[in-house]
């Protein structure tokens, strides 16, 4: 079974280019699969990676691949 990836509201905003209010509304409408924990009067949303649009998924995968490559370059011998 594949591991579920949960992203914060800020990460989703960076990937999709949407503002926090838009992401929150899409969560409430059910466009994004999400969960939240309530701290005081604030909700901290966690959005399921699989519910994001394909363009955002590709952008996320590109970031992960680039960070892996930079890690290998940093560890490689001169």
Image (tube, helix red, strand yellow):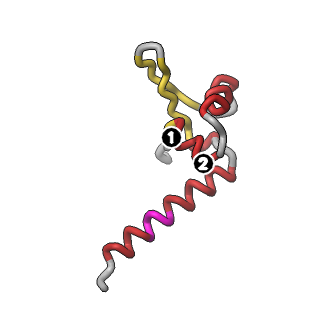
Asked if residue 56 lies in the magenta stretch, the reply is: no
The tag on residue 15 is 2
Nearer-the-camera pick, 30 or 71: 71
Nearer-the-camera pick, 48 or 13: 13
Callout 1 touching callout 2 (CB < 8 Å): yes
- In the displayed orientation, state which residue is furthest to the top: 41
- In the displayed orientation, state which residue is furthest to the front: 19
Name the residue located 45 percent from the left edge and 22 percent from the top edge.
Answer: 37
Callout 2 crowding tier (Cα within 10 Å): few <14, some 14–19, many ≥20: some
Name the residue located 47 percent from the left edge and 14 percent from the top edge.
Answer: 41
Nearer-the-camera pick, 28 or 4: 28
- Identify the residue position indicated by label 1 in the image: 7
From the viewer's perspective, tell me whether residue 8 is left or right of residue 51. left
- Stretch in magenta: 65-69
Cα–Cα span, label 1 and label 2 = 10 Å
| Residue 51 quadrant | top right
Q: Secondary structure at mark 1?
A: strand
Quadrant holding the C terminus: bottom left
Residue 48 vertical placement versus 35 (above, below): below
The x, y position of residue 50, in whole percent, is 60, 43
Give the main secondary structure of the magenta stretch: helix
Q: Secondary structure at mark 2?
A: helix
């Amino acid at each position: 079974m594949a591991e579920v990836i949960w992203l914060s509201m800020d990460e989703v905003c960076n990937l999709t280019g949407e503002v926090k209010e838009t992401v929150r509304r899409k969560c409430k409408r059910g466009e994004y699969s999400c969960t939240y924990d309530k701290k005081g009067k604030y909700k901290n949303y966690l959005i399921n990676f699989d519910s994001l649009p394909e363009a955002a998924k590709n952008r996320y995968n590109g970031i992960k691949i680039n960070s892996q490559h930079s890690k290998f370059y940093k560890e490689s011998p001169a």
